[in-house]
Image (cartoon, helix red, strand yellow):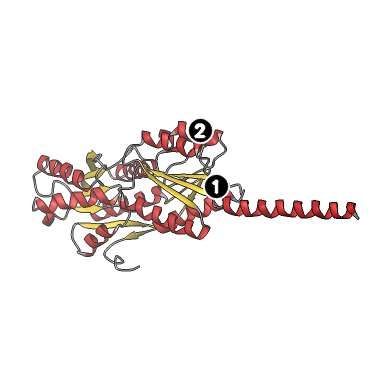
Amino acid sequence: MNTYRGAVRALLAGSLLVATGFAAGGALAQSKVAVITPYLAQPGTQFYVEAFQAAAKDEDWDVNVIDTAGDVAAVISRIEDMVTQNVDAIVINVDPTQVTAGLQAAADAGIPVIGMDAGSDPLLVTNVTSNGYAMAAETATYVADRIDGQGDVVMFIFEAFPPVQVRSVIADAVFGNFPDINVIDRVTPDVSDGGIADSRAKMEAVLAANPEPGSIKAVWAAWDQPALGALQAIEAAGREGEGIVITGIDANPQARDAIAEGGNFEATVAQDFTGIGTTAADVVARVIAGEEIKQGVIYVPTKLITAANVDEE
């Protein structure tokens, strides 16, 4: 009998330990995820970070969004901090080749890192983004067609960030296929304040250097902020009547408003920022669950926006 009671006690004790383990596991089950970016001042980044956070609520994750406010180098130390905190996953929005030390620290610790509109890198599980090649081809060909394949064009570029850098590569290729299109300036604006103000200042300088009406046929911008700055400069100079064609990429609210007004800003490309954020969250959930992601890049569809469809959802 004593043996039986002892067995029962042992069984109950074991059950209690298991139950306690489940309770502790339940308390510890909330996954910790860090999102790190130096570009939170950019509207596009804000949109997909917000979408990621919304999706994370459904997963009951503890999400820590870290903004290094334009300081790319600081991303490395922030990644290392998250490694020390032993988070379950890290999401970055920055050129991965510039933060290799941080990515290696995460890899050594077995912490997966997912790119959210970042760039491709062997140390990333995958990169969730829009197809920059396709977007740039659409806007560059729009410009070429609108100016009948001839005239001087100003380009606003940003080669420090891979998703934007590839756009200028494709635009260059498109314009290079038209012998009568001449790229007269390649401008890299300061994006620390969002990019509009400095783009306006730099466009004002370009206009001053090319004062003759018709001397600039178009402005191709790799994203909307420079396009909006260029538009402000053109209007302030009283040169909006010259028919200078402006295109951007992102279709942020200000760009849509400008296109709807029917002025110089004629086209942009709508990225599905919500789709990027939610897809990145889906990838994180799959990785945390132990799934192997085989795609090095996951593209989210985009759409050309002009006056013809700017009012559509």
Quarter occupied by residue 185: top left
- Position of the C terminus, as image quadrant, is bottom left
Crowding around mark 2 (Cα neighbors within 10 Å: few <14, some 14 to 19, many 20+) is some
Where in the figure is residue 253, as x and y percent of width and height?
28, 60
Give the numbered dot on residue 295.
Answer: 1
- Helix, strand or loop at mark 1: loop
Label 1 vs label 2: CA separation? 22 Å
- Helix, strand or loop at mark 2: helix
* Residue 158, above or below 270: above
Where in the figure is residue 61, as x and y percent of width and height?
50, 53
Residue 128 visible from this viewpoint: yes
Q: Which residue in the rendered view is the most extreme toward the right?
A: 1
Q: Which residue in the rendered view is the most extreme toward the top?
A: 101
Q: Residue at x 40, y 37 (%)?
A: 75
Identify the amino acid type marked 2. Ala
Front residue (pair 147, 77): 77
Where in the figure is residue 101, as x and y percent of width and height?
46, 31
Q: Seen in the image, is 161 located left or right of residue 283?
A: left
Identify the amino acid type marked 1. Gln
